[in-house]
Image (tube, rainbow, N blue to C red):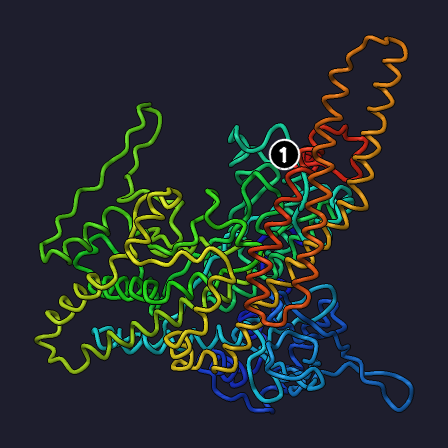
Amino acid sequence: MSTSIPEIYGSLVFNDKVMKERLPKDVYKAVHKTAKNGTHLDLEVANTVAAVMKNWAMEHGATHFTHWFQPMTGLTAEKHDSFISPTDNGGAVMEFSGKELVKGEPDASSFPSGGLRATFEARGYTAWDPSSPAFIKDGTLYIPTAFCSYSGEALDKKTPLLRSMEALNKEAVRLLNLLGDTEVTHVDTTVGSEQEYFLIDKDLYKARKDLLLCGRTLLGAPAPKGQEMEDHYFGVLKPKVSEFMHDLDMELWKLGVPAKTKHNEVAPSQHELAPVFETANVAVDHNQLTMEMMKKVADKHNYACLLHEKPFDGINGSGKHNNWSLVTDTGENLLDPGSTPADNTKFLVFLLCIIAAVDDYQDLMRISVATAGNDHRLGANEAPPAIVSIFVGDELQRVLQSIDDGTIFKSTAKKEMEIGAHVLPHFTQDNTDRNRTSPFAFTGNKFEFRMPGSSLSVADPNIVLNTAVASKLEDFYKAIKDVPEAERADKITALLKKMLDDHKRILFNGNGYSDEWVSEAEKRGLLNLRSLPEAMPYFIKKKNVELFEKYHIFTEAEIRSRYEIFLENYSKTIHIEALTMLDMVKKDFTDALVKYQTDVTKEALSKRKLLPDAKCRLETGILDTLDDCSEAIGKAVEKLEKDVKTAEAESDQLKLASFYHDEVLTDMDELRKPVDKAESMIPGDYIPYPTYDELLFSLR
């Protein structure tokens, strides 16, 4: 097989290049029109596409096809059907029709629906998304699709994402046209998702029940070394890890995923992969593929890839920075301020609309990243706080201040950096530093939303962001559309000033990790929604329901269903964690604790038999401490078991999620303390599962 990267890249993708080469011109144009404008695709055209797609797939070894969709589990789903069609003479032919390409009928009864349908109502539909190219994986042709119920409600994440992209495109295009940019006919949201992850030894992973069932460790004393030496971040890649990353790149490139950057992250055994920007819909699909391929390739290298937001206590967890921008079909990045941002009216209009959107819908922004796993990470001095704010940097802050003051902005000349050694090149210093503590940071020509967790589908934050920004673009359009052209510039200036006055509370360039910011944010009236149960009631507030309904992103029934699903997933996650923790403590750790106590007791008795005056301070000290731990463990187990039973009797989803957060998680923290303390005193050969030092420092 060729090792030329340009030849390998996209070789398993039915992309534009393949379609242009293989489809008749009129069919190619029809598919393009459908992908761009959402026009209906005739069955005759679909039949032609299906035949060509099947032949291409078979040339690459495919025997099956699947409609690949993203239900409300946050994962992907697939049902594989072969191309085989038996003939009367006992043979078979390979067939794939346009109807099979365009529509599928998976059983929808067992996917989360949040009460949209009863369990016995099984029929659901998948519909081909021609804007995201089909691809081949493991001998199957994968066709990206949307997923809906028999009555048409969205049961997935792709459908509302596409709706939000259309809403933003519509509002952005007509505002740009009004501002004089009449050549623009389409605006795309572009996304690049930086994916953090951990790699650990697969055999050690299999020996940890909590990692297998929950994706994170529920017990474990800290290793003697963590991340305090700051030697892992951007450190030299270990040879086997480098081999894994190389193979991962190759697999992703074959699937057309533009993997670009790879490096070690802050915590031991933690790493990151970052792609090049793509259209939001494709970027979301590709991020799902990336997570899947990480696990698959890791398995081949005898690793386990952990995507949980907080797999280990005491060191950094993993996030997924969502880099978001707007690009026109004329090639202009609308978030590029240019060399003179104060004079760039288009940029300032879009910047202020985004600031207003994030401020007015900060609750939805927080909800879009709320999960049981991510709640462990946000606000823990390793990730942005649960308070949504915007960092714009020094220069843009001065530009906005001049708008607010009504003064003329005076730009400072860019400074040439001199590092002090003549052999090193001089380079221009950026106009602003970066702020890693900000949840929503402007980083030169894009916004970086840093709150999403590593396992999250980035469809959710992009749905919210697209829709909220669309609403502000529409407001701005309506405010200036009837203003005479001669007066429009003054009206725009006045509008920008008012928007800034109304929404400058959301702007913060300081340290988001500080306690002072928490107090300051409260004074400003910003929300601090620390957990999913605390945040979810905002999802069904009137203003948010009206936003989603206005732009046809969700019906009220779809909003209510997601409200139920998010709460239910949260409770189920913690329920499984609690049961797993109890199982590990009672069946595994207690046995190790008792055995070690018994052996130490025997050793002390044996010593006193030989030396009657021996004080056995070491042994009795160990036994005293372990006895205290045993007592605390017993009480904590009893409390956790009691509260789990109480939770199992609660039917109201919000009350249940709140109980799991307030009581069960607290119980688990209280149980972990004495277990971890005891573990730190017990020799490793007694502990029935791998410890933190083994898990985090075993890779070579």
Q: Position of residue 451 (x, y in %)?
A: 46, 54
Q: Position of residue 357 (x, y in %)?
A: 33, 66
Assign a secondary structure to mark 1: loop
* Residue situated in front as seen by the camera: 532 or 260: 532
Task: State whether residue 98 is above or below residue 641.
Answer: below
- Residue 122 located left or right of residue 269: right
Q: Quadrant of residue 543?
A: bottom left
Position of the C terminus, as image quadrant, is: top right
* Residue situated in front as seen by the camera: 165 or 607: 607
Query: What residue is shown at x 64% (from left), y 72% (from top)?
Result: 68
Task: State whether residue 171 is above or below residue 681.
Answer: below
- Residue 197 located left or right of residue 332: right
Task: State whether residue 672 is above or below residue 92.
Answer: above
Q: Where is residue 475 in the image (x, y as percent from the top left)?
A: 26, 76
Q: Residue furthest front?
A: 613
Q: Position of residue 584 (x, y in %)?
A: 76, 47
- Going by the numbered disc 1, the residue's amino acid type is Pro
Say if residue 331 shows up in the picture: yes
Instruction: Write down the residue under mark 1.
Output: 222
* Crowd class of label 1 (few under 14; some 14 to 19; many from 20; radius 10 Å): some
Say if residue 8 shows up in the picture: no
- Residue 512 located left or right of residue 374: left
* Residue situated in front as seen by the camera: 383 or 328: 383
